[in-house]
Image (cartoon, rainbow, N blue to C red):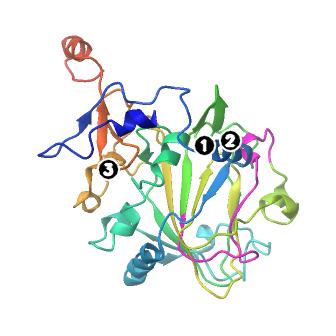
Amino acid sequence: LRRAFERLPRGLPKGGGFLRTGAALRKFGAKTFISEDERYLFDLNGFLVVKGVFSSEEVRDANLAIDTHLAQASERQDPGLRNTRDNTPLSGDGKTGRIDLGGFLGWKKPYCDPFRNVLANQRLIPYYHEFVGEGYRLDHQPLVIIQDKGSEGFCMHGGTIDCTSGEYNQHLAYACRNGRMTNALLGVSVQLSEHNEGDGGFMIVRGSHKSNFSMPKKMIHGELYNEHIHQPVTEPGDVVIFSEGTVHGAKAWKAEHQRRIALFRFAPCNMAYGRSYTPLWPQEVYESMRDEEKAVLEPPYSARLDRPVQTLDGTGVKVGSRSAKKMEHDKTVFGTTYF
């Protein structure tokens, strides 16, 4: 498979446009894009930590961009915006809220670049292809999450079986069939600060993407069974990739330094949870964007229907099409290009 990708033309044709390759789309059940160890560990735990994806210079540039736009950030102090129950281990000092900052894909250059680079990054595309499939798309509006010392975390949420209700949640579900993993929604968290043991921040219940029952209420709020709750230790430039079908949350922040992450969610090509793509993403997001990045902003539809798909090396896109005869038949029957 990799040799087949290497034989594809590199980059875009002169004058722009997409590379059209009908047969190069990955077949269901084909060999994994990532290592066998990583595939096993993701299926076992419901998340991976990919080390050193971004350099110290790239992390510096991202933090500089955040500093420049920090006045636009919003702290979640209103009781209606808080994500924890009062007087629980996750609620922090009870007054310092989480700080959210969005809109960075539309910031002026060069400030947008460190974040746009997550969309079609050469190191990350194999994981996107493996976990949500070729033609993956950006689902939610991405955001920077900031926590100062004492900031509340976020109670446990998510799960293929919703951790609160115990009901099956097809919008977040993880499954593995015939050696092929699928995720209805994938979280990708770029680490922009150190997360040492005991600092707080992202927490996850290993293996909970395959749990079949609701979570004990006191565990949801960090009051019981903490031995089953894992806080990954990460360095700036690492990327945490997790299924939204794995129950997760955030611990109150205890460290002296400020916590910073950039959080993205991706979905399979024909699925959507969020609505930011409709009718279009904000116009400034598209300005000076590479074709490989624009492809990630496509609305949900099948990769068979002229969808631009990132090549494995992130240097271009290809388009998978149905036959010309079938497309002409659609026009005859429906009066439209696509059924």
Q: Which residue is mark 1?
A: 172
Vertical relation: 123 (above or below) 13: below
Q: Position of residue 221 (x, y in %)?
A: 78, 63
**Which marked residue is nearer to the observer: mark 3 or mark 1?**
3
Q: Earlier in the sequence, mark 3 or mark 2?
A: 2
Residue 215 picture location, percent across and down: 81, 50
What distance separates the C-alpha of mark 3 from that of mark 1? 30 Å
For marks 3 and 2, give the CA distance: 34 Å
Q: Alpha carbon of mark 2 to alpha carbon of mark 1: how far?
A: 6 Å
Question: Which structural element holds mark 2?
Answer: loop
Which disc is residue 315 wearing? Answer: 3
Q: Amino acid at mark 3?
A: Thr
Position of residue 302 measured from the top left corner of the image (x, y, whole percent): 39, 30
- Three-letter amino acid code at disc 2? Thr
* Whether label 3 touches label 2, CB < 8 Å: no
Residue drawn at 42 percent across, 35 percent down: 3
Point out the frontmost of discs 3 and 2: 3
Residue 194 visible somewhere in the drawing? yes
Q: Amino acid at mark 1?
A: Leu
Residue 249 lies in quadrant: bottom right
Question: Principal SS element in the magenta part?
Answer: loop
Q: Is residue 12 above or below residue 320?
A: below
- Circle 3: element type: loop
45 to 339, vertically: above or below: below
Q: Which residue is mark 2?
A: 160
Whether residue 240 sits left or right of residue 53 in the image: it is right
Q: Position of residue 53 (x, y in %)?
A: 51, 63
The reply to whether dot 2 and dot 1 touch (C-beta < 8 Å) is: yes
Q: Quadrant of residue 17?
A: top left
Q: Is residue 273 visible?
A: no
* Magenta span: 190-214
